[in-house]
């Protein structure tokens, strides 16, 4: 009989719920798995001790012909370009994936990495012609004064472009928390290129309230929970190229446990 495979997120949830004292039947209902699967996960966790999340069940069938590194590369390709095909991924890494079939690449993406194929409802990015037209428009009107702009003209600011601009940020795509320290090593969020609430007359009217809420909300989260990356996984900080105006989060696995 082929065993039920659960992903690391489900296993972590089972362990966390049990730690909170939730009954087995209730856990099974909440994670959408059978009672037997929940008992198996809890048994494995008990054997490991310290409420650890058990590793995946040993795989049945043939030897896995991709490694953690190739899985990460496959995942990265898709995050970089959500429209990439399995054939293109194979071509991107001819040496590393030479013994891996396109079917296996698809399998990794669908089943193991939970990245399902879907058709984008809208065109993701601007076409070349659209970009050219916008640039021509900007060049034509760049000398105009505020008075020359007609009342009612809609003006928007691309926050994502500013936040990813090398003009304001050294390596904008790198995780560098220290960039938020001033010369006295004190935290500062005042930076010329940091405009999450936009700028100008129509900037966010709720900025001070939002800043307070964010502080309280994130402090409460980090005070009561621990966040960690599942073993063997990496977190991606890549920006989804489909998000022209917003930096929407991409789906990633994370283990959240209650802080003792
Ligand atoms: C993290 C939280 C928030 C972020 C990142 C945010 C960001 C923004 C941005 C980028 C704009 C657009 C400005 C523009 O048109 O250029 C905006 C507008 C606005 N926001 Fe927020 N906002 C947040 C929370 C809030 C909250 C909590 C409130 C109210 C309680 C609020 C009220 C408004 C209002 C009324 C506008 C329209 C301002 C206008 O057009 O004059 N926002 N916000």
Image (cartoon, helix red, strand yellow):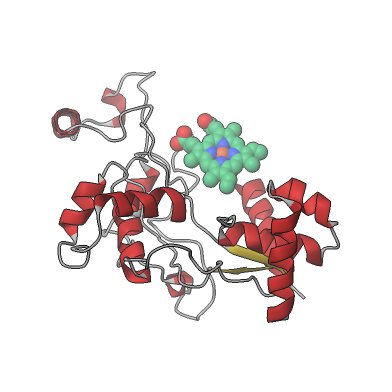
Q: Nearer the viewer, residue 60 or 11?
A: 60
Q: Residue at x 22, y 63 (%)?
A: 97
Vertical comparison of 75 with 144: above or below = below
Q: Nearer the viewer, residue 90 or 213?
A: 90
Q: How many marks?
A: 0
Q: Nearer the viewer, residue 223 or 18?
A: 18
Q: Is residue 119 visible?
A: yes
Which residue extends farthest front? 1
Q: Residue at x 69, y 62 (%)?
A: 221
Q: Quadrant of the N terminus?
A: bottom right
The quarter of the picture where residue 63 lies is: bottom left
Q: Residue 214: x, y in percent?
A: 64, 54
Answer with left or right where residue 19 lies relative to residue 243.
right
Q: Residue 6: x, y in percent?
A: 58, 57
Answer with left or right where residue 185 lies relative to residue 220.
left
Q: Nearer the viewer, residue 214 or 175?
A: 175
Q: Residue at x 35, y 52 (%)?
A: 79
Q: Quadrant of ligand 1?
A: top right
Q: Residue 256: x, y in percent?
A: 65, 64
Vertical comparison of 66 with 78: above or below = below
Q: Is residue 203 visible?
A: no
Answer with left or right where residue 195 lies relative to residue 223.
left
Q: Residue at x 30, y 26 (%)?
A: 147
């Amino acid at each position: 009989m082929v065993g039920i495979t659960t992903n690391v997120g489900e296993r972590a949830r089972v362990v966390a719920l049990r730690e909170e004292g939730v009954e087995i039947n209730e856990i099974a209902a909440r994670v959408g798995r059978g009672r037997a699967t929940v008992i198996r996960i809890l048994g494995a966790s008990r054997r490991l001790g310290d409420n650890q999340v058990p590793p995946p069940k040993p795989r049945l069938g043939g030897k896995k012909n991709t490694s953690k590194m190739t899985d990460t590369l496959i995942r990265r390709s898709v995050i970089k370009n959500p429209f990439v095909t399995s054939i293109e991924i194979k071509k991107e890494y001819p040496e590393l994936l030479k013994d891996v079939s396109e079917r296996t690449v698809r399998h990794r993406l669908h089943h193991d990495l939970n990245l399902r194929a879907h058709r984008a409802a809208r065109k993701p990015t601007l076409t070349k012609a659209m970009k050219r037209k916008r640039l021509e428009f900007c060049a034509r009107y760049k000398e105009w004064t505020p008075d020359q702009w007609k009342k009612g003209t809609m003006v928007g600011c691309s926050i994502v472009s500013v936040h990813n601009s090398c003009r304001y940020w050294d390596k904008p795509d790198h995780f560098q928390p220290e960039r938020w320290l001033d010369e006295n090593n004190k935290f500062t969020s005042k930076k010329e290129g940091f405009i999450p609430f936009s700028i100008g007359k129509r900037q966010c009217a709720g900025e001070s309230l939002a800043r307070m809420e964010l502080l309280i909300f994130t402090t409460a989260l980090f005070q009561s929970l621990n966040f960690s990356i599942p073993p063997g996984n990496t977190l991606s900080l890549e920006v989804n190229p489909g998000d022209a105006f917003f930096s929407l989060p991409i789906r990633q696995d994370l283990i959240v446990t209650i802080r003792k």
